């Protein structure tokens, strides 16, 4: 898949500060980031470097303290809660480390759930999208099963299907292999690679350099800043010395 050179995500000079007990924690410090349509980007770095915070802001689950964020050429950094939720439901598909499936819903119902918040979408369209998504991840034969009846790898495939069903502009994957063994982790990586070949835009957070190599481009974070790979290696050496 080649890049279209059309920025889907454009972040400029973004900062995020958390305040607790009069202590300021700068999770992000002047981040600049651009992700083009059709691109597959991995964000990596040591624990606590700000990559999950950045992904939460990209996914409109959190807001920045300062800076600009354009999603599909529209400014989204200062939207209210309801508007962020609406855009998130329409534009963004999430894949979490812990799968986040609802235990008392079937596979079909879990994948359908985000679509139920789209009031103008007819039920026949729900069914079409759910079945298409489950077929893409190879889980259509398990649609009546419950999460407890599935392996970890199968649960993550269902989670990917749930993210796909809404036809999002971008898939955000936060440590998607973190709760999987190496074999199932590689299978999920292969699934994401195939989705990218089919045109999906993917932004993935991972601490595992093996999985980061699956992406087209790797972004390295350290202490809330985007750094070059060689600079990251130097900083890590200094902190471990």
Image (cartoon, rainbow, N blue to C red):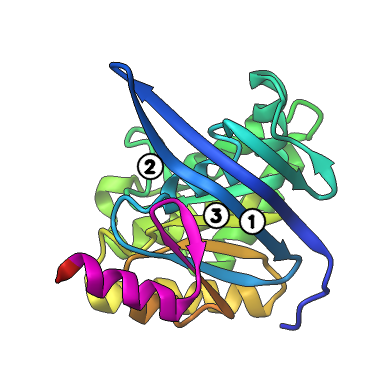
How much space separates mark 1 and mark 3, taking CA atoms? Answer: 18 Å
Q: Residue 184: name its quadrant.
A: bottom left
Q: Position of residue 198 (x, y in %)?
A: 69, 76
Q: Nearer the viewer, mark 3 or mark 2?
A: 3
* Residue 100: mark: 2
Q: Residue furthest left?
A: 241
Q: Secondary structure at mark 2?
A: loop
Q: Is residue 148 magenta?
A: no
Q: Residues within 10 Å of mark 1 (few under 14, many from 20)?
A: some
Side of 8 where 220 appears, left or right: left
Residue, x 29% and y 60% (percent of image)? 178
Q: Residues within 10 Å of mark 3 (few under 14, many from 20)?
A: many
Residue 204 visible here: yes
- Where 168 sits versus 44, above or below? above
Task: Specify start and end residues of the magenta stretch as a single range.
Answer: 220-239
Q: Position of residue 34 (x, y in %)?
A: 70, 61
* Residue 172: mark: 3
For disc 1, the marked residue is 32
């Amino acid at each position: 898949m080649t890049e279209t050179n059309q920025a889907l995500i454009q972040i400029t000079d973004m900062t995020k500060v958390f305040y607790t007990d009069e202590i300021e924690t700068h999770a992000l410090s002047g981040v600049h980031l651009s992700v083009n349509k059709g691109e597959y980007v991995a964000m990596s770095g040591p624990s606590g470097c700000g990559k999950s915070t950045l992904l939460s802001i990209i996914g409109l689950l959190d807001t920045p303290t300062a800076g600009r964020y354009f999603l599909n050429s529209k400014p989204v950094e200062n939207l209210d809660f309801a508007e962020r939720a609406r855009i998130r439901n329409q534009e963004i598909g999430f894949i979490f480390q812990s799968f986040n499936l609802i235990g008392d819903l079937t596979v079909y119902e879990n994948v359908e759930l985000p679509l139920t918040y789209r009031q103008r979408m007819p039920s026949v369209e729900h069914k079409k999208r759910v079945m298409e998504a489950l077929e893409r991840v190879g889980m259509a034969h398990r649609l009546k099963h419950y999460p407890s009846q599935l392996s970890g790898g199968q649960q993550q495939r269902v989670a990917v299907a749930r993210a796909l069903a809404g036809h999002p502009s971008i898939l955000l994957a936060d440590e998607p292999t973190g709760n999987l063994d190496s074999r199932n982790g590689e299978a999920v990586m292969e699934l994401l690679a195939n989705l990218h070949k089919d045109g999906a835009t993917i932004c993935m957070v991972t601490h595992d350099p093996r999985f980061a190599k699956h992406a087209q481009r790797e972004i390295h974070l350290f202490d809330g800043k985007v750094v070059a790979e060689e600079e990251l290696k130097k900083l890590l050496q200094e902190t471990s010395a």
